[in-house]
Image (spheres, grey):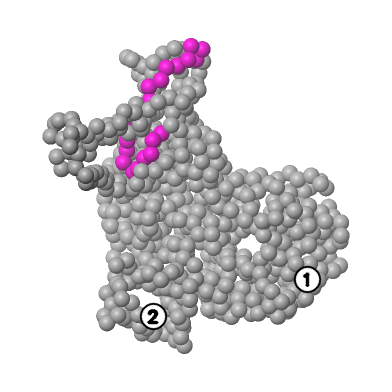
Amino acid sequence: MMALRATKKTIIIASAVTVLLVGGGAAAAMVISGQQAQPRADASPEASPEPVVTESPAVVPVTNVARASVDGWTLADRRVVGTVLPEVGDAAQGAVSLRVDAPADDADIVAATAPVALAPDTEYTLTASVRVLAGEKTETGVRLTAGGQTFTLPELDAEWETIEFPFTSTADQPAASTLDVVLSGAVRGFGIDDVSITAAGTDNLVPNGSFEAVQTPAGIVNDSLVMTDESAVLAVSLAEGPVQWSATSTAGGEPITGEFGSAGPLSALPLTGVTQGHYTVAVNDSSGRKIQTDVAVIDTDGFSVSQDGRFGVGAHVEKEAFIGTGSLAAAIGFAEVRNDISWERNEKVAGQYVWDENYVREFERMHANDVKLLGLVVYGNRLYGARKAPGNEAAIQAYGAYAKAVADRFDLVGLEVLNEFNHRENDTACGPAPACYVPIAQAVRDHVSTAYPDLPIVTGSTALYDSEWFTGFWQAGGMAVTDAASYHPYESWINRDADLIAGTVQQSYADMQEFAGETRPVWVTEMGFPTHYDGVSVLEQGQMMVRNQALAFANGVEKYFWYDLVNDAADPAAGESNFGLYENSPRPDVVALAPKPGAFAQALMITQLRDKAFASDESDDTTTVEVFGTEGDETRIAWAKQGEVQHTFASDVPVTVTDMSGQTQSIVPEGGEVTLTLGASPIFISSEAE
């Protein structure tokens, strides 16, 4: 491992100057008034206080990444690294740098590599500008390698720092070598730019070391259109010259407008003045190209929304619209995805599992984005008789063996046994009775639990909450095969009443206790409100989502999987196709899927709760108020049950009120109270630190 050539920084404290050597080396020397400090002959019995050197946190710039390739470099497949893409907004040199974001804790992964030709036994200097998008110094989780030699990076923050590594190539150095960016584990927001390897009097051996040469389609090329206030930048490839843009809030109001100058193959269009919310953005460049898309901006710490393990989402990675499910889900803050893993797709010869490429590609991309999989093991397999469910002992055991193979292959948060067994047309002799389901779940437990004792077996998965079916299931011994009970409480959707879920969850726990004598955690593994012509509006979808999820968690639901991540089709009138949080396909001259207002609402809720657990219920006859968090760090989700209601909250400190459009207001209490008007649209109320 080669040594780092130290970069000196000088910090002035009153009349003293302290020289800090970054990356080790000689001890720091303190110089006072230009003289070397000398020890006193008669030291005072009271030691003089040591000067405390503190640095202000680095300012994290507003940047974002583009879906583009980089000339001269090979970037890791997104099945291996979540993000390794060109970054715009604040390069060390030029307009483009390279960003690596790899939340999965995988080691020894090459994120980016470029060819270099090194001569034997020659002195070189590797130079690079590097940073991490963080206010404080942090480990990068990155090392560089060149010509078989390894160079470890120091702790970094959001300020670009130029580092130099002198090294000598070996006597038997091959002419063809590479410069590699290697990950040692989880990496968040690492940037690299202005990379060079030079010997005395030679040119840079690293091709495109400034990352300026990229290949990208024309238009808005953001990898994601869900952004935070630290990533509210459009990556654009437009005609050179002036560009006009506007952003209009979906909640209404006057548009925000601006202009910037496009130059080069990739530019950063900063959304100056665009605060938290969901917007329609229009861009017009000097060639007359007109582009329009929707975006979401979330006010949170960091360049991405932090994931919350309580929140999951349904997907159908077998469909083209769901390519990139892992990054689409993670951008909103989902930590888990529920997806079919079709038995017939993967076992076409008895006892042989050949995994469908759609599953392999997308589940690996999910892992790379630190998104876990709730594997839904469906349905029957005609190799063993019935197509819709296993219907005999041989088929049931083969189903259990297949579930074990799924657990062997993929990164799971749980295995769910069949889907809506109580509701689907059944082609087995036994039928949909709960007594027919118990042996199937038992086979999964028998095959899986010895090897994976901590992997939850999720049972039920019923259409609606079918109390009669669950009663029979518990009476038939279902508790013994269940780690978590699941159902799809679409009663709330059918009745257009998001609040019905509270009674549904209460009934499910009561049935468990009455007919099994104990309970298991409840996972709502499918629930949503579609935005087709007979559904709800795009704004109501988000409002109903927040109310439904808040009440689910308040009544004991452990995990909640929204249905669905992406619209299943482009037809806005198709009911089953419009449950999604993203549109079905990218708009013209835009590479990423546009988020619907529901995506913003979900990201807003995840950000507002920030992993806070449910604490208490403060509801009354006219309002619903659910409290999350501990005393002093609480967030309330509140709305009126009917019409508009004045509600008074006790508070000795100012509170921040955030509505569903994302607008915030700070309110100072009077006499220890804050009075707010509540309506059908929920609001978030958070205590401000004193």
Residue ID for mark 1: 477
The label shown at residue 678 is 2
Seen in the image, is 117 located left or right of residue 563?
A: left
**The magenta segment:** 153-173
Tell me residue 336's x, y (percent): 57, 57
Residue at 86% over, 61% down: 392
Quarter of the figure that contains the C terminus: bottom left
Task: Please provide percent x and percent y for residue 133.
Answer: 37, 45
Q: Is residue 205 above or below residue 548?
A: above
Q: Would you say 464 lies left or right of 53 here?
A: right
Q: Residue furthest bottom?
A: 621
In the picture, residue 573 is in which quadrant? bottom right
Q: Is residue 2 visible?
A: yes
Q: Position of residue 33 (x, y in %)?
A: 12, 34
Give yes or no for residue 159 being in the magenta stretch: yes
Q: Is residue 88 left or right of residue 527?
A: left
The reply to whether residue 425 is in sight is no
Q: Main secondary structure of the magenta part?
A: loop
Q: Where on the picture, by quarter, is residue 426?
A: bottom right
> How many marks can you see?
2
What is the residue that sits farthest to the left in this orientation?
Answer: 33
- Residue drawn 60% across the image and 45% down it: 364
Between 272 and 667, the one lying in front of the other is 667
**Crowd class of label 2 (few under 14; some 14 to 19; many from 20; radius 10 Å):** many
The span from disc 1 to disc 2 (Cα, nearest Å) is 45 Å
Residue 559: x and y in percent read 58, 65
Q: Nearer the viewer, residue 208 or 613?
A: 613
Q: Earlier in the sequence, mark 1 or mark 2?
A: 1
Residue 505: say if magenta.
no
Mark 1–mark 2 contact, CB under 8 Å?
no
Amino acid type for the residue under numbered disc 1:
Gly
